[in-house]
């Protein structure tokens, strides 16, 4: 039986407290008055040698459909020009003011989703092990079960933040929740049968209920299998795992439309669900490897040998490439066809998010490709830890790039609100996962494949 | 030309073969070669063969393929006859690069795979019309053959081999190359 060390307990609680402070500071400092934003913009414009403010206004108007009409009016009706200019200036300042107030919400949401996604990715990996009747992995089942204990609390947090942003917040993450925006937007009106707050909440509830039910019963059956006399519980887990995977691949796709893609309600990509899945899958496998190595270094999990580590690292390598494949498939088609309503997604990211956008590619593709390619390196724990930390940071930035451009535009920075959110949910994740690890023996017993797993060698 | 004696021990199971290899190695006999109908995992390590360098070769071949693809696409699409496809007449390699990624990927894989296979054939001294080297045609079906060099004590080696589960043991006079 594993007992949580006081160090981890104190560390995770400290992270939660520090994170809460960071998130609190983020919310406190995000309320800027109209005048404050106005002076800030004027300062920025002066700092960049003027012209920048104009340029930014130009950009905002060209990105926004109905402002085009305003611009043509401006050209034709000379007498109204000055009035329009005042309106435009006011709209721009209010726009920036809204972006600034969106930042702590989005930072909180990105952090919450990132850690939730790790749990969900591991849940899918776990179900695949059962459905495939994998022989190598049973010694890692309890580690996976520990991580998946975060799916329910983490998912509830993500859903609550999303709903709160549209009820107690000022539509800080999802613009389609704002009835005012919908009233002036024909495209969102067309989608409002799907994109409305009650439906969003109900769907979120169904997703979480389905995933948690599977997690609950799989856990129950594997613990029952420990003291069973036959394989009936294993067979039950096999059956529900296969069923869960069917449910999962539909609901995961819908979840990614709801919880991520709808932040840009005009934009859509048909492989978005797969893309998000690849991200959660590789992050999840990386965390399995990290926690396994941690427990092994503390003298637990003595059946885990370097072949298990090698296999996990192979998955980290392979799924990183799979992620790149999906990222590129999405990017290249949109880049090539160059249809305005699609390509705007990448235009904003390349213009305003150059460093995180291309940095993420380096961290999630080029780095794992070169570092984890060599077979021998996949067996060296510190090497896999370093690669894993980079991969996790890269996938945090991936989620960041999916949410932030839609909510805060070019007003992004990885500062106190973002790091605070990562610490808050990272601490919560560690606390919940390591508490769950203490609830059952760290190695399953009487799993029909446990012998094969113990003697697994490459 | 000097004649040397070898023993051919035949096994009918890869697990028995693996444990036999370990025993024979432990007794310090020299295993010259093993013929198997399919690749047996871990056999190279058990025999104490040097680790393969084909992976390094493959990486280098992949780099060659990538370079060929970049050079080729740059010449064809940018320099020799600049083309306007999908309204992208930018005449710059880096701006058109996403369109070339599939080609770069495919040629990397193509070069790595083909050159790796050719290297493997050459290093294994296999080429068309070459006579097969395996001494017993059953090793292409369901039997495993271990060839052990014989120096002196024939009795103790045959005893050891039959102990390890060999189904057939033959002493062969072999012409040294």
Image (cartoon, grey):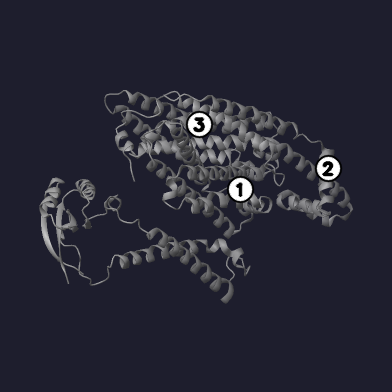
For label 2, the crowd category at 10 Å Cα-Cα, with few meaning under 14, some 14 to 19 and many 20 or more, is some
Q: Are marks 3 and 1 in contact (CB under 8 Å)?
A: no
Q: Are marks 3 and 2 in contact (CB under 8 Å)?
A: no
- Residue at coordinates 32% horizontally, 33% vertically from top-left? A450
**Label 1 secondary element:** loop
**Would you say the residues marked 2 and 1 are in contact, meaning their CB atoms lie under 8 Å apart?**
no
Q: Is residue A300 left or right of residue A358?
A: left
**Which corner quadrant of the image does residue A440 belong to?**
top left
Q: Which residue is mark 3?
A: A151
Q: Earlier along the polypeptide chain: callout 3 or callout 2?
A: 2
Residue beneath label 1, please?
A267
* Chain where mark 1 sits: A
Tell me if I can see residue B81 in this picture: no
Q: CA distance from mark 3 to mark 1?
A: 28 Å
Looking at the image, which residue sits at the far front? B152
Q: Give whichever of B156, A82 is nearer the camera.
A: B156
Return the residue found at the far bottom: B80
Q: Residues within 10 Å of mark 1 (few under 14, many from 20)?
A: few
Q: Residue at x 46, y 66 (%)?
A: B65
Mark-to-mark CA distance, 3 and 2? 43 Å
Task: List x then y, in percent, for residue B158.
Answer: 12, 52
Question: How busy is the neighbourhood of tag 3: few (under 14 within 10 Å), some, or many (20 plus)?
Answer: many
Query: Percent x, y for residue B24?
Result: 20, 50
Asked where in the image residue A452 lies, by quadrant, the reply is top left
Q: CA distance from mark 2 to mark 1?
A: 30 Å
């Amino acid at each position: 039986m594993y007992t949580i060390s006081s160090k981890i307990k104190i560390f995770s609680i400290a992270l939660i407290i520090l994170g809460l402070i960071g998130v609190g500071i983020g919310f406190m400092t995000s309320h800027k008055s109209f005048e404050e934003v106005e002076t800030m913009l004027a300062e920025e414009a002066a700092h960049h040698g003027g012209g920048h403010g104009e340029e930014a206004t130009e950009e905002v108007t060209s990105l926004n459909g109905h402002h085009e009409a305003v611009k043509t009016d401006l050209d034709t009706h000379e007498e109204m020009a000055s009035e329009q200019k005042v309106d435009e200036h006011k709209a721009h300042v209010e726009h920036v003011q809204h972006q600034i107030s969106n930042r702590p919400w989005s930072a909180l949401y990105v952090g919450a989703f990132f850690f939730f996604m790790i749990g969900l990715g591991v849940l899918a990996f776990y179900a695949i092990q059962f459905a495939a009747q994998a022989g190598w992995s049973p010694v890692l089942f309890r580690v996976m079960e520990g991580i998946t204990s975060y799916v329910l609390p983490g998912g509830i947090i993500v859903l609550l933040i999303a709903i709160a942003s549209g009820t107690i917040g000022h539509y800080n993450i999802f613009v389609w929740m704002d009835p005012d925006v919908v009233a002036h937007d024909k495209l969102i009106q067309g989608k409002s049968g799907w994109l409305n707050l009650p439906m969003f909440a109900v769907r979120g509830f169904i997703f979480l209920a389905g995933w948690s039910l599977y997690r609950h019963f799989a856990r129950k059956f594997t613990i029952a299998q420990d003291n069973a006399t036959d394989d009936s519980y294993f067979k039950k887990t096999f059956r529900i795992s296969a069923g869960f995977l069917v449910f999962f691949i539909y609901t995961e796709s819908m979840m990614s439309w709801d919880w991520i893609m709808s932040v840009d309600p005009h934009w859509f990509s048909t492989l978005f669900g797969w893309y998000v899945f690849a991200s959660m899958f590789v992050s999840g496998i990386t965390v399995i490897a990290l926690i396994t190595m941690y427990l092994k270094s503390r003298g637990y999990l003595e059946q885990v040998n370097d072949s298990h580590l090698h296999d996990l690292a192979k998955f980290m390598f392979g799924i990183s490439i799979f992620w790149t494949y999906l990222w590129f498939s999405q990017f290249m088609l949109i880049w090539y066809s160059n249809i305005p309503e699609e390509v705007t997604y990448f235009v904003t990211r390349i213009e305003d998010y150059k460093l995180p956008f291309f940095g993420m590619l380096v961290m999630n593709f080029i780095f794992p490709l070169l570092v984890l390619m060599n077979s021998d390196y996949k067996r060296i724990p510190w090497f896999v830890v370093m690669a894993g930390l980079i991969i996790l940071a890269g996938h945090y930035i991936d989620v960041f790039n999916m949410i932030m451009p839609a909510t805060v535009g070019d007003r992004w920075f990885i500062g106190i609100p973002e790091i605070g959110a990562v610490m808050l949910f990272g601490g919560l994740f560690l606390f919940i996962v390591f508490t769950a690890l203490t609830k059952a023996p760290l190695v399953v017993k009487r799993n029909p494949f446990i012998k094969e797993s113990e003697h697994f060698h490459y | 030309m000097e004649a040397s004696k070898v023993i051919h021990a035949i096994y009918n199971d890869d697990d028995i073969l693996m444990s036999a290899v370990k025993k024979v190695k432990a007794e310090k006999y020299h295993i010259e070669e093993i013929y198997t109908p399919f690749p047996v995992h871990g056999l190279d390590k058990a025999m104490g063969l040097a680790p393969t360098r084909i992976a390094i070769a493959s990486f280098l071949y992949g780099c060659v393929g990538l370079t060929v693809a970049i050079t080729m696409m740059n010449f064809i699409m940018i320099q020799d006859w600049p083309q306007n496809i999908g309204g992208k007449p930018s005449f710059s390699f880096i701006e058109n690069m996403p369109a070339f990624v599939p080609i770069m990927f495919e040629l990397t894989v193509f070069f790595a795979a083909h050159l790796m296979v050719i290297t493997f054939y050459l290093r294994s001294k296999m080429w068309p019309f070459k006579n097969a080297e395996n001494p017993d045609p059953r090793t292409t079906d369901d039997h495993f053959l271990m060839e052990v060099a014989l120096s002196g004590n024939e009795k103790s080696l045959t005893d050891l081999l039959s102990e390890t589960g060999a189904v057939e043991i033959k002493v062969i006079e072999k012409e040294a190359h």
